[in-house]
Image (cartoon, helix red, strand yellow):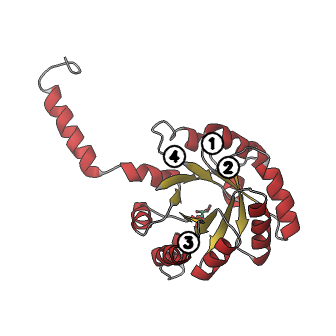
Amino acid sequence: MQIFLDTAEINEIRSRLDAGLVDGVTTNPSLIAKAGAGIFERVAEICDAVDGPVSAEVVATEADAMIAEGKRLAEIAPNVVVKLPLTAQGLVACRTFAEAGIQTNVTLCFSINQALMAAKAGASYISPFVGRVDDAGGDGIGLLAGIREVYDNFGYETEILAASMRGPAHVEAAAAVGCDAATIPPKVFDALVAHPLTEKGLAAFLKDWEATGRKGLD
Ligand code: E4P
């Protein structure tokens, strides 16, 4: 499964690239605003740092204006994915980009029907918001599983990008139901590797080794 970082903080991204575990990045207007950066400059910086897909979202709400904004975003770098809201107008823009061979990420998905419509409009990625569905009393992982089933039933190639992920349990569940990707905040990314028993076991190994009085392996 691909793992994307869900942040516009460039240092948070750069500091997590060395192990080759980050497959891409997603941003949204809130994340860009929080980072205090200009969208064109920041997306360019992220695209320089990361080879994989980098989602950059439009802020217009009418299809023609979304298309104009999306084209400007797509010109930043070849790995930009134009992020569009899951509205009727957003899907018109999605169809236009699909026909032009420009990658899209259709975001703010909260139902299987919405995901079905996005796939029919030629979306490259669909972003179901797992945490926000849970917050509203729904079943976020059930939504992912339902979308997987429907896409498989009809052979849609739109990739399921699990979003609004609140912790490692969401990532495990998204992987288990067959999502193609998950986008996660940096802290959740770190928590995928960390385990208290790993830390405890390592501390015991090192203590026993230190007791031998050896330096390093010698
Ligand atoms: C995804 O594309 C969004 O940027 C993000 O996952 C939203 O997550 P939130 O519900 O934590 O804001």
x and y percent of residue 114 in the render? 64, 78
Q: Earlier in the sequence, mark 4 or mark 3?
A: 4
| Residue at image mark 2 | 35
Q: Amino acid at mark 2?
A: Ala
Q: Earlier in the sequence, mark 3 or mark 1?
A: 1
Q: CA distance from mark 3 to mark 2?
A: 38 Å
What element does badge 4 sit on?
loop
Q: Amino acid at mark 3?
A: Gly
What element does badge 3 sit on?
loop
Q: Earlier in the sequence, mark 3 or mark 2?
A: 2
Q: Nearer the viewer, mark 3 or mark 1?
A: 3
Q: Residues within 10 Å of mark 1 (few under 14, many from 20)?
A: some
Q: Residues within 10 Å of mark 2 (few under 14, many from 20)?
A: some
Q: Nearer the viewer, mark 4 or mark 1?
A: 4
Q: Residue 155: which disc?
A: 3
Residue contact at pointers 2 and 1, CB within 8 angstroms: yes
Q: CA distance from mark 4 to mark 1?
A: 13 Å
What element does badge 2 sit on?
helix
Q: Is mark 3 within 8 Å of ligand 1?
A: no
| Residue at image mark 1 | 10
Residue contact at pointers 4 and 1, CB within 8 angstroms: no
Q: Earlier in the sequence, mark 2 or mark 1?
A: 1
x and y percent of residue 213 in the render? 14, 20
At a point 49% along the width and 75% down the height, the residue shown is: 140
At a point 75% along the width and 72% down the height, the residue shown is: 91
Residue 122, picture quadrant:
bottom right
